[in-house]
Image (tube, rainbow, N blue to C red):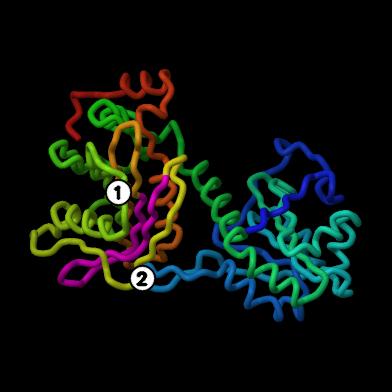
């Protein structure tokens, strides 16, 4: 696979140095991407752009990861502070967008834009925490091919910056439950960021299981569990084992109040991917949970990986129950919170001391 060519600020006239600190934060919804394009060209490119960004996830109703919103190039001033922007047109097509690209890109970059692996990305262009991508090629067919060829990388870039923005908004020292984090660190050797409105529902050392809950009994519940296997072998790390372990854990701990039913993985819409979790090989799984007798359900995300230093397999799992609401953004929040997980070896001495000093053993969790 050819390595994507990245553009430096000196190659594009638009990317003139500007102090990011002086810019306001980008605005708008996380799941909206504004596409600067002429209407006719957008119609021809829509299928490729939609296949790239408007990926459906089932929660269980289908929801899109991103929604595309076309704007004309003469409206670009109105969307310059939006979080996610794509500018797309063939080179020298004569359209307004093509003319706009020609005014912001110098000749050396135009030559590179004909390369099937080349596109321009710029962070913090008009606003902080913003991503702008310029997609162009010699002709419409070549441009469509470029979009589809690079769709995974394009989607990843917008997902990553969205996660980064969400992480900034979720993580706050003011609303952090350091007392719970310190207890987890002391008792189990790891932490995960605990927001103020999460509570420690269960901590079961004999089962290596911790359950954090938010808003139990409401119509918008969120659950996180961490489970680990000591003295494990990395060979255990496979999708079948992950399914079996998760079902075993949820059958025991995710039960209805009358103990008549329990949570299982739904058969439909289960997907898995190999990912990098902070330098570790991990398997990311995503799907739906059901009750074994049906009647309720929702989405979940799961990271399972082997930690070589502790010789543990960790399973990090986040679920949402919110039958009255769209759940795309809620499950993204769960994903970002799971990514806050760290073992003791990954923490500084000052951080460890701060968390351990925050423990209040007089509190019954």
Q: What residue is disc 1 on? A: 235
Task: Say which residue appears at 81% left-offset and 40% top-offset.
Answer: 17
- Which quadrant would residue 342 be assigned to in this image? top left
Query: How would you classify the magenta stretch by its main secondary structure?
Result: strand
Label 2 SS: loop
Q: Is residue 107 above or below residue 18?
A: below
Mark toward the start of the polypeptide (1 vs 2) = 1
Question: In this image, 66 relative to 238: left or right?
Answer: right
Asked if residue 147 lies left or right of residue 189, the reply is: right
Crowding near pointer 1: few (<14 within 10 Å), some, many (20+)? few
Label 2 crowd (10 A; few <14 / some 14-19 / many >=20): some
Residue 94 is drawn in which quadrant?
bottom right
At x 40%, y 57%, the residue is 331
Q: Residue at x 34, y 49 (%)?
A: 304
**Between residues 335 and 114, which one lies in front from this camera angle?**
114
Q: Secondary structure at mark 1?
A: helix
Q: Is residue 336 magenta?
A: no
Q: Are marks 1 and 2 in contact (CB under 8 Å)?
A: no
Q: Which residues are magenta?
A: 281-303
Q: Position of residue 164 (x, y in %)?
A: 54, 46
As measured in the structure, the alpha-carbon distance from the residue carrying label 1 to the one carrying label 2 is 25 Å
Percent position of residue 85, x then y: 68, 59
Residue visible at 78% across and 74% down?
38
320 and 266: which is toward the camera: 266
Residue 344 shows up from this direction: yes
**Image quadrant where one finds the C terminus:** top left
Q: Quick one: quadrant of the N terminus?
A: bottom right
Comparing labels 1 and 2, the label whose residue is closer to the camera: 1
- Which residue lies under the disc numbered 2? 269
């Amino acid at each position: 696979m050819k390595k994507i060519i990245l553009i430096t600020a000196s190659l594009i006239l638009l990317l003139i140095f500007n102090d990011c600190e002086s810019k306001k934060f980008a605005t708008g919804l996380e799941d909206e991407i504004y596409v600067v394009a002429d209407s006719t060209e957008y119609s021809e490119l829509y299928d490729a752009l939609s296949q790239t960004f408007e990926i459906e996830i089932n929660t269980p109703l289908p929801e899109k990861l991103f929604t595309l919103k076309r704007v004309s190039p003469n409206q670009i001033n109105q969307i310059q502070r939006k979080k996610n922007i794509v500018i797309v047109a063939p080179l020298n097509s004569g359209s307004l967008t093509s003319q706009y690209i020609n005014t912001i890109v110098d000749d050396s970059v135009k030559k590179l834009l004909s390369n099937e692996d080349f596109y321009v990305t710029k962070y913090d262009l008009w606003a902080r925490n913003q991503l702008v991508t310029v997609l162009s090629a010699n002709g419409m067919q070549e441009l469509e091919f470029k979009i589809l060829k690079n769709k995974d990388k394009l989607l990843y870039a917008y997902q990553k910056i969205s996660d980064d923005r969400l992480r900034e908004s979720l993580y706050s020292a003011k609303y952090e439950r350091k007392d719970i984090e310190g207890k987890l660190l002391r008792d189990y050797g790891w932490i995960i960021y605990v927001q103020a409105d999460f509570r420690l529902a269960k901590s079961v050392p004999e089962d290596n299981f911790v359950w954090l809950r938010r808003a139990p009994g409401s119509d918008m519940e969120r659950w996180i569990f961490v489970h680990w296997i000591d003295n494990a072998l990395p060979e255990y790390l496979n999708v079948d084992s992950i399914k079996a372990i998760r079902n075993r854990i949820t059958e025991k701990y995710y039960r209805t109040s009358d103990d008549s039913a329990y949570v299982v993985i739904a058969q439909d819409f289960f997907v898995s991917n190999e990912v990098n979790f902070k330098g570790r090989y991990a398997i990311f799984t995503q799907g739906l949970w059901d009750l074994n007798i049906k009647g309720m359900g929702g989405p979940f995300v799961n990271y399972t990986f082997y930690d070589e230093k502790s010789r543990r397999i960790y399973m990090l799992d986040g679920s949402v129950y919110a039958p009255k609401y769209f759940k795309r953004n809620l499950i993204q929040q769960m994903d970002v919170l799971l990514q806050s997980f760290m073992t003791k070896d990954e923490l500084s001495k000052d951080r460890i001391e701060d968390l351990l000093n925050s423990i209040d053993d007089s509190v019954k969790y």
